[in-house]
Amino acid sequence: MERTLIGDLAGKKGMVVNIQGWVSVRRDQGKMVFFDFRDRSGSVQGVVLLKSAAIETAKEVRNEYVVSVEGKVNARPEKNVNAKVQNGDIELEVSALTVLAKAEPLPFDMSLDGYNLDLTTELDHRALALRHPRLQAIFKVQEVIIDSFREYMKGQDFFEFQAPTIVPAVAEGGAEVFKVDYFDKKAYLSQSPQLYKQIVMTAFERVFSVNKIFRAEPSSTTRHLTEVVSLDAEMSFIQSWEDVRDMAEATVRYILLEVQTKCAKELELLGATLPAMIEKTPTLSLTEAFTKLDIPADKDLNPEQERKLCEMIKEETGSDFVFVYGYPTRQKPFYVYPNPEAPEFNEGVDLLCRGVEWLSGGRRINDYAQLMEHVQKWGMDPKKIEMFLEAFRYGAPPEGGFAFGAERMTMQILGLKNIREATMFPRDMHRIDGSLSEEK
Amino acid sequence: MERTLIGDLAGKKGMVVNIQGWVSVRRDQGKMVFFDFRDRSGSVQGVVLLKSAAIETAKEVRNEYVVSVEGKVNARPEKNVNAKVQNGDIELEVSALTVLAKAEPLPFDMSLDGYNLDLTTELDHRALALRHPRLQAIFKVQEVIIDSFREYMKGQDFFEFQAPTIVPAVAEGGAEVFKVDYFDKKAYLSQSPQLYKQIVMTAFERVFSVNKIFRAEPSSTTRHLTEVVSLDAEMSFIQSWEDVRDMAEATVRYILLEVQTKCAKELELLGATLPAMIEKTPTLSLTEAFTKLDIPADKDLNPEQERKLCEMIKEETGSDFVFVYGYPTRQKPFYVYPNPEAPEFNEGVDLLCRGVEWLSGGRRINDYAQLMEHVQKWGMDPKKIEMFLEAFRYGAPPEGGFAFGAERMTMQILGLKNIREATMFPRDMHRIDGSLSEEK
């Protein structure tokens, strides 16, 4: 008999079907055994009566056994209907039960409400914990975030390219980079596809990439990992940095809308409320931000100031988001475009939400002479970025771009406390899958 | 004036428009200057007459200058119509020409027909060469290959996860792996997401990933790179290895169809003919393959035998593709499922096309006891794959999967001679962007 997905059972009342999946719950009541079976499409209750040929197997089966189940889809008696759960009005009366794979006794409670692991234990048992609806919901939301980014970019005529992971030199900063043992030559893991997306932009105009980036920060905060997924975009023929800001805003707006539409169930399960984006997200220069906060101007907002600013903007406008632009030029990388009317400030822009930076971007220098001037001023070695410089030597249009982290956004959207919760296989200085202990 | 994309000019005859892009060709005929302008949507001819206000700028502009052009879209006189090229029936009569960015004189001929670099020089100038229509066509086809893989998987209810890059141990083989300097702990670059996709399969049933994999092979062949994009799928609740084969076939069929439909222009430019996939791709066991080749059975087909087999199948059936299954069990990794009726052969399967392996996959062991038996026999350290083993300890359904390389498939579909041509930023033992010389 062909397998029916559990999510399709609702329309099959009175029919005999085959389902295949895992045992989530088993309650032996002596005269009958109740089960919750689950597959990728959902859950359904099953009952094995004493008279059923399946009763012996039913007595042996335990949680997380993988089973093939034949049974009749019965409507539940009115008093047993549970409108709050999937398939709450039906029940599978099991006539045959085959074990496809056994499971050892579980090391912890995997039930929907009983699951309650501290994060370290959860990460030590990530393989098993991934079966829990709460974790599945997190990663389904993350999938939608990444998909929506890609969809929106493609809809705006952006070309997707594969940014490299192994890089020959470190363009920005050097301390927080991982070295790779590369045939006795110098090589590193990419900290950002920044220079590559700018290169590809000079050929394809509008480009994006979904790629891993790496930071060797020896820190153990709730917001940092050594390996994350970066969503990167770069666009040319812009009129001003505002074009970049507007594209970033439209992208985030699209992602939020998609998450809201496609992940209603997951958001409810996780108790998450999406941040509010009003029709036009407020924009402040850094100087204006400091004025608003009524404190002296500085190089950047600190976390406390970011929180305060977001609160004020929320209060005033209802927006959970605010753009801040115009940072001190020398505080930022060499490629950021200085404001022609006040060159001590640049045209970089960050998007804050609920007190945290979500996205960073801005206009870049496209004029080769100006770029070379900055390379000199920033003390960079042109040989190490020769491929990048070549792209701009032969005609590069006015351009800019932005980037944000998939895990960070997942964490923020869902109100998770730790970025490790928003990462399927988180890596930090103490953990790669399991805890790191073996010295090299 | 708002920018019009060159690809939209055909419908704007008689109108004055603004276009923005690069100068591909410039022919100064004294009394007038002809241009080919290009943007991401295509090319158009422009003409600047002596009487035009743009004539002075037109005399200064050179190839690859980035320009903003105002002009009237004129129908070309009948005798000048060129039906073979985009916009061959129109011409832009330029009234204003603004330089957005200059370009230095080009180091080589970038014209459509004149471009003729040897591969090493092309790779040394990748940033500039990427602007050539031939290279753009290659990477557009690659984008469609990857997109179609993702689309087909999603259509079949596969969940996309982000496979990790940094891994704690080397599950298969050890020599060809890159070490990462990871806070003084052992860490490597992933050679394959195999064990991770199997883990995630036990939670999400059907999963796929698009991710980088790394091989430290100290070789310099035309088919190997150190960093490539792997397209990986894993599916559960299969009846047999044939389910995996059929999914692989359907996936490749979908990709070919999408490339044919969406990349007709690119295929023509590159002179590529897609391989023929008949209604049901022929399948042979390895033993049958050797019989067909009329040679004694061996552990695997060598490249010459693969070529010969593909020729014979093509001759007999018209199919460019052939599946070969059933390899000696001990020749393959521990997780491959042995044929229950002849355990010395496994249920791994490869897809060959035009003499080359395109895709590899098969059924995997899902029974925990059998898996542990193989772990022992293969001499593996269970501690190093504890996360993987946990997934199978607690109930894993019958399952299998497949994987193929995006660059390899791009190369094969387009009939390119070297995988570096199918890789935007190829890495090998001698090159990361530029040639490697600096010792670490």
Image (cartoon, coloured by chain):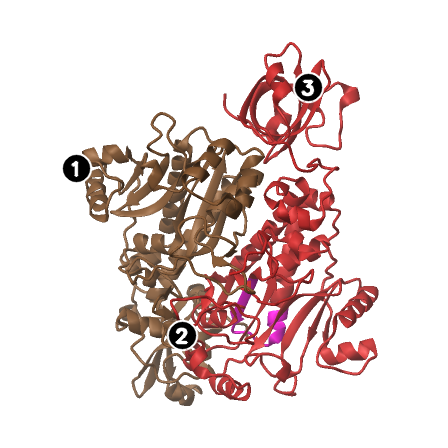
Chain colours: A red, B brown
Please state which of residues A222 and B94 is positioned toward the viewer in this rendering: A222
Please give the label number shown on residue A33. Answer: 3
Q: Which is more foreground, mark 3 or mark 2?
A: 3
Spatial separation of the CA atoms under disc 3 and disc 1: 59 Å
Badges 1 and 2, same chain:
yes
The residue indicated by pointer 2 is B92
Nearer-N-terminus badge (1/2): 2
* x then y, percent, for residue B236: 50, 35
In the rendering, at what x and y percent does residue A427 appear? 59, 57
Q: Amino acid at mark 3?
A: Val
Q: Which residues are magenta?
A: A231-245
Q: In the picture shown, does residue B93 fall above or below B166?
A: below
Q: Is residue A287 visible?
A: yes
- Please tell me whether residue B121 is drawn above or below residue B102 in the rendered image: above
| Chain ID at mark 2 | B
In the displayed orientation, state which residue is furthest to the left: B294
Determine the secondary structure under disc 2: strand
Local secondary structure at mark 3: strand
* Residue B99 visible in the picture: no
The image quarter containing residue B111 is bottom left
Mark 1 or 2: in front is 1
Percent position of residue B414, x then y: 30, 55
